[in-house]
Image: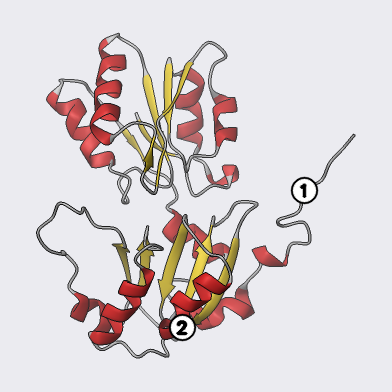
Amino acid sequence: YLIGAGPGDPGLFTLKGKWILEHADVVIYDYLANERLLEFARPDAEIIYAGKKGGDHTMPQHAINALIVEKARENKTVARLKGGDPYMFGRGGEEAEAGIEAGIPFEVVPGVTSAVAGPAYAGIPLTHRAFVSSVCFATGHEDPTKPETMHDWKALAQGRSTLVFFMGMKNLPEISRKLMEAGMPGDTPAALVHWGTTDRHRSVTGVLASLPALAVEHGFAAPSLIVIGQVVSLHDKLGWYEQKPLLGKSVVVT
């Protein structure tokens, strides 16, 4: 089972994902999957961490694929717990293909993607009748082995969609520059959302031209989403999660 763990808030995990975790023999989980979800696993389940973050990989993707196949061939029910949604920049498609090639049946359990949940918790609706009627999700970190980018920067810059970039913090200056070079105004509202929906959630807003400087000034790093578009102007008005009095604070009970 390829299971979407959701964006971080364990309350956004699906009931079907919970049921599978409760019955799985093996749970292989990612860096972005909230470890509290492992509490649903059986006490005797084999728990394996296969996290990857910004160049620090516990195991490369081909090894993860092989591990899933190996455990399934042992006639075990395998729950592959992936941050967000398995098929939204989660390489779930590659893991599903590995199963198919090995003759292993699989199912996909969609999860709430951080691209929707993170901005929502930050007070940014990705669509709004007064501003925009479409959304574009894009990766800010393409496969470095590709001969050229698959992004059509002109289409991204001159379209009217809200843009949401995953995994783009290292390339934020380049993303900002390319969009402006392709025709997007530098004063387009833009935001960063860090660890959206979790107790480490925080956000900052500005405009496209100043976003890289804001990231440095406020210490934003991965995992953060980049959100660009007029809907970002609603952040201060609709931001509800960041108004919670205990957000980001620790409580110790002796």
Q: Position of residue 171 (x, y in %)?
A: 34, 66
38 with respect to 77 (left or right):
right
Read off the residue under disc 2.
Answer: 210
Q: CA distance from mark 2 to mark 1?
A: 32 Å
Could you say whether the residue bearing mark 1 is in a helix, strand or loop?
loop
Residue at coordinates 46% horizontally, 83% vertically from top-left? 210
Whether 63 is drawn above or below 32: the answer is above
Regarding residue 123, the answer to whether it shows in the image is no
**Residue 133 appears in which quarter of the rendering?**
bottom left
Q: Say which of 90 and 110 sits in front.
A: 90
Could you say whether the residue bearing mark 2 is in a helix, strand or loop?
helix
Whether 219 is drawn above or below 131: the answer is above
Foreground: disc 2 or disc 1: 2
Amino acid type shown at disc 2: Ser
Read off the residue under disc 1.
Answer: 250
Quarter of the picture containing the N terminus is top left
Q: Position of residue 220 (x, y in %)?
A: 53, 64
Residue at coordinates 13% horizontally, 55% vertically from top-left? 146
Quarter of the picture containing the C terminus is top right
252 with respect to 19 (left or right):
right
Q: Position of residue 26 (x, y in %)?
A: 42, 18
Q: Label 1 near label 2: C-beta < 8 Å?
A: no
Mark 2 or 1, nearer chain start: 2
Q: Position of residue 211 (x, y in %)?
A: 46, 78
Amino acid type shown at disc 1: Ser
4 with respect to 68 (left or right):
right
Residue at coordinates 25% horizontally, 20% vertically from top-left? 69
Residue at coordinates 59% horizontally, 44% vertically from top-left? 11
162 with respect to 250 (left or right):
left
Whether 67 is drawn above or below 60: the answer is above
